Image (cartoon, rainbow, N blue to C red):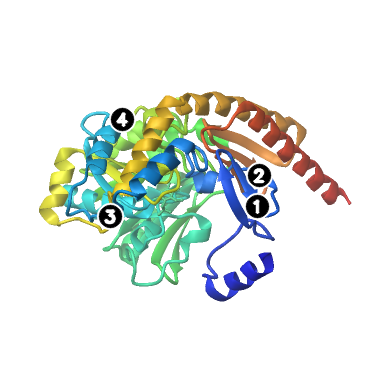
Amino acid sequence: AYTRVLDIHEKHLSPALTTYFPEPLLLHQGHMEWLFDYQGNRYLDFFSGIVTVSVGHCHPKVNAVAQKQMGRLWHTSCHFFHPQMHEYAEKLSALLPEPLKVIFLINSGSEANDLAMLMARAHSHNTDIISFRGGYHGSSPYTLSLSNVGLFKMTLPSGTGCQSLFSIRIRHLIILILSDALTHQALEQCAQTFSVAFGEEATVEIHQCKQLGNALVHQVPRGREGDCCQAKDRYIEQFKDTLNTSVAKSIAGFFVEPIQGVNGVVQYPKGFLKEAFKLVRERGGVCVADEVQTGFGRLGSHFWGFQTHGVLPDIVTMAKGIANGFPMAAVVTTPEIAKSLAKSLCHFNTFGGNPMACAIGSAVLEVIKEENLQENSHEVGIYMLLKFAKLRDEFEIIGDVRGKGLMIGIEMVKDKTFRIAPSMCVTKPDADFAVEVFRSALIQHMERKAK
Ligand code: PMP
């Protein structure tokens, strides 16, 4: 059966689909934090379907709700009401602070950020969008141009997304500015501004990207995470300089992940986002927290990642863990921003807010509460972080161990990061097991290298 699957995969599935394993796993079943293959081997799932299976595979309560709803009503389109949508909207809004009370239901994180971009532009009447290099916000043309993680950066076909990409890298902080109006001349002007701002440490170059138009890339060597955490004031100064350049005057929105996920669990200096939000708002832009990975209690100490920074965004985008693996996403914003969008376009989509997704989403929220999964993320997260951090003393190859709750990154020297993000039902014995497996893998690696 396995060879047949590989054969079909090669013939009929997208060659762009990547797998992390030389021999991809053929999975058959899941139960809570465990996955099973056809041979009956059991795997502790420490990535939960890209940080998505929030409460556990085939969680019995979520399954029961899904089965009940499946026998009742699947789809009505957003033009007809059904109680599942309204119940869900009420439940979700109760988890967000004022004035974040208006909910748009859609199907994926990319759609959520696309919609947030439209909202930011409609509300601010500006066009430019700012995000960080290393940020990942989706795979649609607009969100791809907003993302800048090595693998995804150059894959944008010409003529899609924003015309130009403007990127400044200051250690971990890399800023992108997207605009339909950037000219080569404007970029040169920026390059000069940045050379002056960063002095000798900076090398500023303009890159002509084949597929993206002009890109300004500011490169300095990658630092260790410790450097970045002491760098708040410097970050703020550099952020200010960025905003003061001629190309960034009309800011529509600023997109940020409270912790960068795809880029390898990268955290910002404490207090930096608060100041960044203020600076963006002074220039008329709105602030968007991309909670696609960090939301729904995963970070343990708070339900939303933005709360860990003490900021209040104007728009929050969420997906992945929202429905434990069922396609669903949401954008939550203020009544004012929601009105601005409604004035400029009639927004709807076919599947958004469908009865299945909403019923499952409600069950997920109930399970997180009933089973204290946010508290569990906090407790097991700290326990596991300390255990992994200990391995740093044992293995030179581990450069850094960081993260919050059940979003942990282990940076291997040579710029690779292991990301650990199990379902929130994970236990301390699971954590012990995972650390031991990781440890023995490293020992094998070192032994192979020594030969
Ligand atoms: N934002 C973040 C922070 C993400 O990690 C992802 C997915 N990895 C997305 C947006 C896009 O979500 P989706 O794949 O559901 O479109």
What residue is shown with label 1?
37
Which of the two discs, 2 and 3, sits closer to the camera? 3
Q: Does label 2 or label 3 sit earlier along the sequence?
A: 2
Q: Say if 136 sits above or below 409 in the image.
A: below
Q: Which residue is mark 3?
A: 75
Disc 4 and disc 2 in contact, CB within 8 angstroms = no
Instruction: Give the residue type that dot 1 points to.
Output: Asp
Disc 3 to disc 1: CB gap under 8 Å: no
Looking at the rendered structure, the secondary structure element under dot 2 is strand
Numbered mark located on residue 43 in the image: 2
Identify the residue under disc 4: 95
The mark nearer the N terminus, 1 or 2, is: 1
**Amino acid type indicated by mark 4:** Leu
| Residue contact at pointers 1 and 2, CB within 8 angstroms | yes
The quadrant in which residue 207 appears is bottom left
What residue is at 21 percent from the left and 45 percent from the top? 82
Q: Nearer the viewer, residue 31 or 64?
A: 64
Label 1: element kind? strand
Relative depth, front residue between 352 and 444: 352
The kind of residue tagged 2 is: Tyr
